């Protein structure tokens, strides 16, 4: 079982990845944003027309960027997407090689502590965001009890994390090396919780998949419901 944002499994399913959605982690969308440096003349998403925007291809931040542009009345090809890993995008943002950056925590939180950036849009303002736990389809079919037990344990861990955000931040700081102040910001705005995949969640993810296919970002259309794992007895 592995954790991911909303966009990667769509790209994976379109490419034939043997995965299923095992559980959802609905997000409040506060920890993902599109932003610019304080001195930038860019004041809104509409001002991104013709600009270079750093983003990870096939990531949840990619989804945010596409949706935010759409909401502002811009086509995706009216900007210049610069596909970079978060580490490379951080360097490009620092050296002004990109005009704006779309990314998630803790990278967003790190940028906040370093630059006090102007936020153009957060996921919470643009679209309903979920992250997911995925499983190998064959493994989930052969060992459903293991998936059930794992999801249950993750649910208990999420309950603990919700009540111990300072400890979560400290642990992630130690493991990742991300500055503690940034991890505290990220932990304090994270929504902790594990939920089953509902029809509403499927519909939202399908809308994202359809948007990506329409823009030519994935090679073929996908049906999200074909990749949803159902626990035994449900």
Image: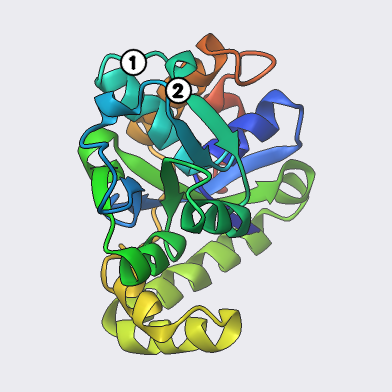
Q: In this view, does 229 lie above or below 150?
A: above
Location of mark 2 (residue):
79
Q: Where is residue 160 in the image (x, y as percent from the top left)?
A: 36, 81
Instruction: Name the one closer to the observer, 168 or 95.
Output: 95
Task: Give the alpha-carbon distance from disc 2 to disc 1, as whole Å.
Answer: 8 Å
Rendered image quadrant of residue 180: bottom left
Q: Position of residue 215 (x, y in %)?
A: 53, 13
Judged from this view, the residue extending furthest toward the top is: 214
Give the side of residue 23 with respect to residue 126, left or right.
right
Instruction: Name the one closer to the observer, 143 or 197.
Output: 197
- Residue shown at the point (44%, 25%) measured from the top left: 208
Give the side of residue 47 with respect to residue 13, left or right.
left
Tell me the SS state at disc 1. loop
Rendered image quadrant of residue 166: bottom left
| Label 2, residues with CA under 10 Å away: few <14, some 14-19, many ≥20 | some
Q: Is residue 100 above or below residue 215?
A: below
Q: Where is residue 4 in the image (x, y as percent from the top left)?
A: 56, 51
Give the side of residue 11 with respect to residue 200, left or right.
right
Mark 2 or 1, which is nearer the eye?
Answer: 2
Residue 6 visible in the current orientation: no
Location of mark 1 (residue):
74
What colouring does the structure picture have? Answer: rainbow
- Residue shown at the point (51%, 25%) measured from the top left: 80
- Residue shown at the point (48%, 52%) measured from the top left: 93
Tell me the SS state at disc 2. loop
Instruction: Name the one closer to the observer, 40 or 233.
Output: 40
* Label 2–label 1 contact, CB within 8 A: yes
- Residue shown at the point (33%, 79%) measured from the top left: 184
């Amino acid at each position: 079982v592995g954790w991911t944002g909303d966009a990667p499994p769509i790209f994976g399913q379109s490419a034939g990845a043997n995965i299923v959605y095992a559980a959802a982690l609905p997000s409040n969308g506060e920890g993902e944003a599109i932003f610019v440096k304080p001195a930038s003349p860019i004041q809104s998403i509409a001002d991104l027309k013709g600009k270079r925007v750093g983003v990870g291809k096939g990531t949840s931040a990619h989804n945010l960027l596409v949706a935010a542009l759409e909401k502002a009345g811009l086509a995706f090809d009216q900007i210049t997407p610069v596909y970079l890993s978060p580490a490379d995008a951080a360097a490009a943002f620092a050296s002004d090689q990109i005009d704006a950056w779309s990314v998630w925590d803790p990278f967003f939180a790190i940028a906040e502590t370093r630059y006090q950036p102007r936020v153009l849009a957060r996921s919470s303002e643009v679209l309903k965001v979920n992250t997911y736990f995925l499983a190998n389809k064959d493994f989930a079919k052969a060992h459903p009890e293991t998936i059930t037990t794992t999801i249950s344990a993750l649910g208990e861990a999420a309950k603990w994390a919700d009540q111990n955000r300072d400890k979560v931040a400290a642990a992630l700081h130690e493991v990742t090396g991300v500055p503690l102040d940034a991890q505290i910001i990220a932990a304090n705005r994270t929504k902790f919780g594990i939920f089953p995949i509902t029809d509403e969640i499927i519909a939202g993810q399908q809308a994202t998949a359809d948007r990506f296919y329409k823009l030519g970002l994935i090679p073929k259309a996908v049906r999200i419901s074909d990749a949803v794992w159902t626990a035994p007895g449900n």
